[in-house]
Amino acid sequence: MGQTSTWDLERALSRIRELEHLPGALLPILHALQDEFGSIHEEAIPLVAETLNLSKADVHGVVSFYHDFRHSPPGRHVLRICRAEACQSMGCESLVNHVEKRLGVKLGETTPDRSFTVESVYCLGNCALSPSAMLDGRPYGRVSPQVADFLIDSARRHS
Amino acid sequence: MSVKIYVPCDSAALSVGAEAVARAITEQITARRLDLTVVRNGSRGMFWLEPLVEVETPRGRIAYGPVTADAVAGLFDAGFYEGKPHPLCLGATEEIPYLKNQERLTFARCGITDPLSLADYIAHGGYKGLERALKMAPAAIVEEVTQSGLRGRGGAGFPTGIKWRTVLNTPGEQKYIVCNADEGDSGTYADRMIMEGDPFVLIEGMTIAGFAAGASSGYIYIRSEYPHAFRTMKRAIALAYENGYLGANVAGSGKRFDLDVRLGAGAYICGEETSMLESLEGKRGQIRPKPPLPAIEGLFGKPTVINNVISLATVPIILEKGGAFYRDFGMGRSRGTLTIQLSGNIKHGGLVEKAFGLTLRQAIYDFGGGTFSGRPFRAVQVGGPLGAYFPESLLDTPLDYEEFTVKKGLLGHGGIVVFDDTVDLAKQARFAMEFCAIESCGKCTPCRIGSTRGVEVIDKIIAHQDRTANLQLLDELCELMLDGSLCALGGLTPYPVLSAVRHFPEDFDKPAVPPATVGNRAQETHPWR
């Protein structure tokens, strides 16, 4: 939760103002706020609600509906492992077990040193090169446990 | 003129190191002071050969692959930039049988051009469809698309022309074209490839749709799992605006068409068209009961055409060459080409665009080369997570909407996921129910509650608790979900489940094992769960 201190009302307002004129502006605004602060800060909800003339419950309902929106910032690196059918056919579950053991966390959790958040994802559209994963927005295919170790080690070195 | 070297920027190619290969090639060019230009193209769709590097030669484009960054210096030593031999050389790209045996209409340019070069797009036949459409009355454009026999490639297979006609005939000042790019089905990536590899074809298709239906505004709803496609589409749209292909005066016609891209937020259900509309409006992605049809009351309550990426990207060639040209491909009521996506445990995974009618066996063996693992084939799931599992005995089914319906299957978006003999179909059936439980929008009871009950019942069957009674119960539950769900998520989840029970009963009658380990996201400590 250490990173929530980066919440900044002025920056939040300026991101909201850039987008509030859009038809159906709520999702673009939430994405922008999450890009800026790593999560949807609790103070963002009343702010967005007031701007768009919605109730706080409406905004909270949208935030909680979508898997992407977080209520606390993730670790420095986000590793998403695909667990949909194509990746299942190529053994993604053993990859998941390996990564969980290696990082000492379960899917959906963040390591205590906040270096990694590991998550499930259901399809990255790289189904001919399964098992597939995404590290910090970059796609990786044919991810064997060895490849996963390599990715984790090099991410650690660069942070 | 400087010789061009092509290195794909498609995210599947990037996932196996295309960026490092491009960097290594650029370094070698500088070090060796050669007159070569690196072009980042889309993917040809032969993913087992990625990164596939191509060189322009007087004999046509010569392919090398799969290329690693370490192999680049050796390629230069061998003179690959003049098309010279090297162990990685695959010969002329167009002569590779996998590509040569296809009928590429929608994907005619994908992998050939620089996706963000409008000049390239136009040089390869781009905007010819729009040019013809601009000389036609809206009703005539709709008629051309109707005549082509094009059906929705997103999975439902509804005739595109009829959808357009409904919107055209519905009065309204403001109408919309919405492109469904929420390609969430496992085993599918054709939409992603087009958006990353030939984005202008989608823009052109949507512009034509706008003129046909009387809509001056459009949205592309892209899933957040596709960041590269999102960025490429955004840039392509900006370029189209700068060059007068979008905005108040499209291609000098005096007609307006505006286009914007929106990002999803990780909800599978938003691939369902009415959920997608809710999401675009800034709401929870809960489905809307139909009627009213979105063609009558769609986005912001206005008449709306909603089509999949591939449907819209096929429109330009139909307008360019005529509906009859397109209709001449295919079989029965499935006209034109299907963009087959070979996925999962398959040796030669990739995109195969082919007229409808190819059999599953031909797709999996003639193109796909069998399993990746080399183990015996056991099952194939066609049409995404809501499609049926077929055994070996159904492999002679032709890829055709109606033929699949007869076999209680679903052709869907053309995704084919192959499994070898290590697959446990009881686990897969359980996963289908669990996935439905995770992704259900919660609007209707059969889907919201039925899926969770489905997981429990399958667990009991696997654990040999009252097997006969529970198999009967599963059957009834599936019937209820099929008939009672508001949309395809709850309504089609029984397909994989029942097909697994029907074709692979032995997997549901194994010695009792600990609870299935496939897919337990529901138990994850997701921050909002």
Image (spheres, grey):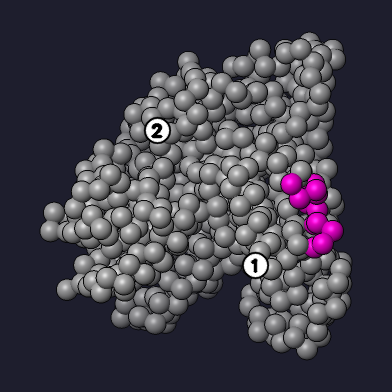
In the image, residue B425 sits, relative to residue A104, either above or below, namely above
* Magenta stretch, overall SS: loop
Q: Give the residue displayed 31% in from the left and 74% down from the top.
A: B30
The one nearer the camera, A96 or B510, is A96
Instruction: Please state the horizontal and vertical placement of residue B215, each as a whole percent of the image.
Output: 47, 68
Q: Assess disc 2: are there few (<14), some (14-19) or many (≥20) residues with their C-alpha within 10 Å of its C-alpha.
A: many
Instruction: Please state the horizontal and vertical placement of residue B417, each as a whole percent of the image.
Output: 52, 34
Q: Does residue B9 appear left or right of residue B65 in this picture?
A: right
Q: Are marks 1 and 2 on the same chain?
A: no
Q: Does residue B255 appear left or right of residue A111 in this picture?
A: left
Q: Is residue B189 visible?
A: yes
Which range of residues does the magenta coloring cover? Answer: A102-114
In what quadrant of the picture does the N terminus of chain B appear? bottom left
Chain under label 1? A
Residue A108 painted magenta = yes
Q: Amino acid at mark 1?
A: His
Q: Which residue is mark 2?
A: B368
The one nearer the camera, A65 or B277, is A65
Disc 1 on helix, strand or loop? loop
The one nearer the camera, B243 or B332, is B243
In the image, residue A25 sits, relative to residue B102, either above or below, namely below
Q: Give the residue displayed 40% in from the left and 55% down from the top.
A: B70
Residue B134 painted magenta = no
Which residue is the extreme one toward the left? B58
Q: Which residue is mark 1?
A: A158
The one nearer the camera, B163 or B432, is B432
Q: Assess disc 1: are there few (<14), some (14-19) or many (≥20) residues with their C-alpha within 10 Å of its C-alpha.
A: few
